[in-house]
Amino acid sequence: MVALASGQPSRAYVLTELIGSVDIGDEVIVNTTAVDLGLGTGGWHFVHWNLRRREWQQPGPGHIMKLRYTSLQADVGSTEEHHRELEHVETVDPLVVIASSLHSQLAGIAVAARHAKPGCRIAYVMTDGAALPLALSDLVASLREKSIIDCSITAGQAFGGDYEAVSLASALVIARHVVNADIAIVAMGPGIVGTNTALGYSGVELASTLDMASALGARSIACLRASDSDPRERHRNISHHTVSALSRLTSRRSEVAFPHTASSQFRDSLEASRIDARHEVREVQIPDVVALFTEHQLKVSSMGRAAKDDPILHECAAAAAVLACSP
């Protein structure tokens, strides 16, 4: 908590790996933009600097910086620096890559994959399409603590994972050849950026993720974004953002799963999307994913809605996982 000039105590994050520790009574500089804009995910203040100190130094593990050319650039190193055996690796076969455009779908994918194939190794690759610090995801912390995912890899400007990667392509190589993962779940961190335009959203990376995974020899599977409860019509049934990415922007053929629980309206939306003209669309029998959340004591929500209030979103995630665990 921080006390602003107004005297009102407010929630705030501090990323100690970037600015060092903060103690009770320290005077700090706070960025209030997220709260001023009324954001949901990320709607906390950020401690930008602790005025108690004049400088902050912390030796890094290499010479690769993230948040480059900003005042908070940090030497986080990279896995590529320390694994010379990766120098000429350009394939990730037989890795299965599940690509999702929403961070909250990570939970459904992971628990359903763990349920369908208990012994598989699961890596989460966090892109830099939304939040950059992995530390902001309580969901990832819970999934790691419960051994539902085996490791995290932060790609691009995202940082804080068990492994750091310079690029998404390299992150997939690390997942396959360093982590020995069977499945890599690729999704941005919390806080997707979106507009009501067809292409003005950070989840457009879904298309490039699928194409890149396929180019590297992976089996690529798309996770559909869908909703029965979103008040915005453009996100009802299959989101227009997913339709844009899969029907217009991909150049390689991937697999797309949808759950057997899907409503007739969902199926109509899927048919109208013409996604099947570019990808292999398959209906999948899924477990009760909301019950799996309860079983693992996971509190999962998306866009402020609990999983039980918008189950189709998480059922689509489970469908992608079950398909990934099948031949």
Image (cartoon, grey):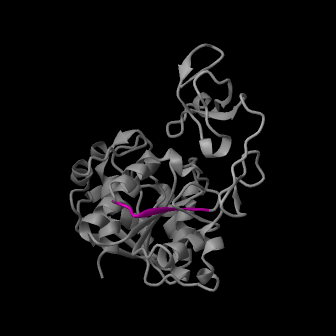
Q: Is residue 91 magenta?
A: no
For the record, the magenta segment spans 148-155
Q: In what quadrant of the picture does the C terminus appear?
A: bottom left
Q: Position of residue 65 (x, y in %)?
A: 71, 58
What residue lies at 37% left-to-right and 67% top-to-bottom? Answer: 271
Q: Is residue 164 above or below residue 72?
A: below
x, y percent for residue 256: 39, 71
Query: From this viewpoint, is residue 67 visible?
Result: yes
Side of 9 relative to 141 (left or right)? right
Residue 191 in view here: no
Q: Nearer the viewer, residue 324 or 247?
A: 324
In this rendered view, identify the residue nearer to me: 297 or 323. 297
* Residue at 35% in and 61% down: 110
Instruction: Determine whether 306 is above or below 45 in the image.
Output: below
Residue 12 place in picture, x, y as percent = 56, 31
Q: Main secondary structure of the magenta part?
A: strand
> Is 239 on the left or on the right of 259, as rendered?
right
- Which is more toward the observer, 93 or 247? 93
Q: Position of residue 142 (x, y in %)?
A: 37, 50
Looking at the picture, tell me which residue is in the foreground, 269 or 250: 250
